[in-house]
Image (cartoon, helix red, strand yellow):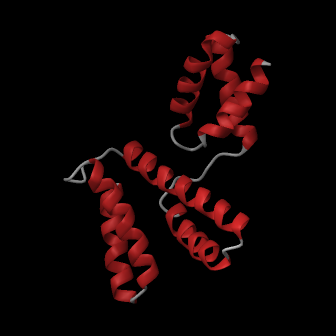
Amino acid sequence: MTIVERLNNEIKTALKAKNQRRLDVVRMLKAKILNVNARGEVTEDEGVKIIRGYAKQLNETLDIAGKTGKTELAAATEAELIIVKEFLPPELSAEQIESVVKAVAAEIGKDKTKFGLLMKTSLAKLGGQADGAVVRDILNKLLA
């Protein structure tokens, strides 16, 4: 089942359950995918990348709302983020990410000049199951 099919099924389920918040969030995710490809023909990796980008935006909003004391906005954003995360693959632990990054570094070579290549290869091997910032931090520690 493709990501668009999953979203369509969730829209139907939310409509039947009369769950307006879930319906709004799932429709937003589908709209973000349709903005990239009007027919909704995106690969699973592309779909995950789009949804992960939206989750990142929500995290930033959550941080700002927390810093400015806007508790209502923070609560609404957190509820939305919980729904969005249901459509993302589970993230790997830091140890699992580190082992993949070390394997890539052993394969390519531990050289600061190859940072971009190491980063790209590591993210490709992790297949959307790790945040790029975490991979970058691990790489920085490894190359230091």
Q: Position of residue 127 (x, y in %)?
A: 51, 38
Residue found at the very far front of the displayed protein: 68
Residue found at the very far left of the displayed protein: 39
**Quadrant placement of the C terminus:** top right
**Quadrant placement of the N terminus:** bottom left
**In the depicted structure, whether residue 12 falls above or below residue 41:** below
Q: How many marks?
A: 0
Q: Which of the 4 quarters of the picture holds residue 64?
A: bottom right
Q: Position of residue 27 (x, y in %)?
A: 35, 69
**Residue at screen point 34% across, 74% down:** 11
Q: Position of residue 104 (x, y in %)?
A: 63, 21
Q: Nearer the viewer, residue 34 or 64?
A: 64
Q: Nearer the viewer, residue 132 or 109?
A: 132
**In the depicted structure, whether residue 38 falls above or below residue 123:** below
Q: Position of residue 99 (x, y in %)?
A: 71, 30
**Residue at screen point 64% across, 10% down:** 113
**Residue at screen point 46% across, 80% down:** 21
Q: Which of the 4 quarters of the picture holds residue 45?
A: top left
